[in-house]
Amino acid sequence: MKSAHDVLLEIRVQRGRRVAQRLGCYLAVAAASYLLNKMLYTVHGGQRAVLLDRFRGVLDYTVGEGSHCLIPWVQKPFIFDVRTRPHTFSAVSGTKDLQIVNLTLRVLSHPQVDHLPHIFKTLGQEYDDKVLPSISNEILKAVIAQFNADQLLTERSRVSDIMRQSLIHRAKEFNILVDDVAITHLSYGAEFSKAVEQKQVAQQEVERSKFIVAKSEQEQKAAIIRAEGESECAKLISDATAVAGMGLIQLRKIEAAKENATTLSRNSNVMYVPRKNILFGVAAGR
């Protein structure tokens, strides 16, 4: 028969075994979770992944969107954003007629997905910051030097097209696709702006002088026509007078007197006084 000490010792051993089993299960679950977390990685929408193998180097394929497996501590994923992104570059350049121009260029670009492993090997994940500023400034200055300052305004769309074609061709050498190129800001130096303003003022003065000349010509024509009309009218009146006598002139005098009398009668400050007997009966009283 077992003693109480032996029974107590056996109970403690069984408890220790259960605790060890539970601890082993917990450790196994934690290890499995950690291993699973290291084996899985996720590529979100608009992204691609490139795998770096510690033994084989950068693998020559691109991993698409979704969750994927890798070998822990041997392979490591590098995520690339392949969506179109805007980049803005400003530069000061000289035109063909030696004018200073300030330009701001906006470029929309994204990498070639099939060439991401090569981009990662040669340029890294900051490929656009390493390539686009230098080639954009180079092309911008080369294109601006082909045009005069005024052509940058009158042929702006043509300048943008030339820049876009040149930048597409140049960026393709680095496996970068350019979607759009646009000139968002264009300004000139102080001297050129002042010259343009003076030219506009001179053109306005010329147009004003043309208007004054045209107005004077029209006024002269109107005066000639008016004089011709008055001369013709006088001739007609003279002819009528010679034929019919002075009756027409007398009629015009009567009409004018009648109009004057009507105007004076309506004025309360005018008093009618007879032409004779101005002193009314004063002279007779004497």
Image (spheres, helix red, strand yellow):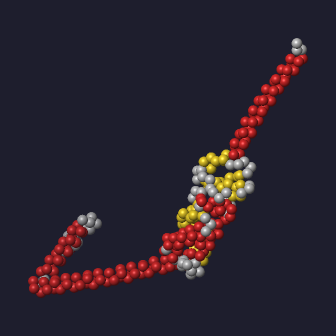
The reply, left or right, for residue 58 in relation to residue 249 is right
Looking at the image, which is closer to me, 26 or 253?
26
- Quarter of the image for residue 120 reads bottom right
Q: Indicate the quadrant containing the C terminus: top left, top right, bottom left or bottom right.
A: bottom left
Q: Residue at x 76, y 35 (%)?
A: 27
- Quarter of the image for residue 181 reads bottom right
Q: Residue at x 70, y 55 (%)?
A: 52
Q: Is residue 50 visible?
A: yes
Residue 242 spot, x, y in % from top left: 12, 87
- Quarter of the image for residue 277 reads bottom left
Residue at the outermost left position: 244
Residue 36 spot, x, y in % from top left: 69, 42
The reply, left or right, for residue 23 in relation to residue 198 is right
Q: Residue at x 16, y 83 (%)?
A: 237
Q: Residue at x 57, y 62 (%)?
A: 108
Looking at the image, which is closer to me, 141 or 20?
20
Residue at the outermost top position: 1
The reply, left or right, for residue 266 in relation to residue 2 is left
Figure label count: 0
Residue 60 spot, x, y in % from top left: 65, 58
Looking at the image, which is closer to me, 112 or 210?
112
Q: Is residue 284 visible?
A: no
Looking at the image, which is closer to me, 285 or 79?
79
Residue 174 spot, x, y in % from top left: 62, 66
Q: Indicate the quadrant containing the N terminus: top left, top right, bottom left or bottom right.
A: top right
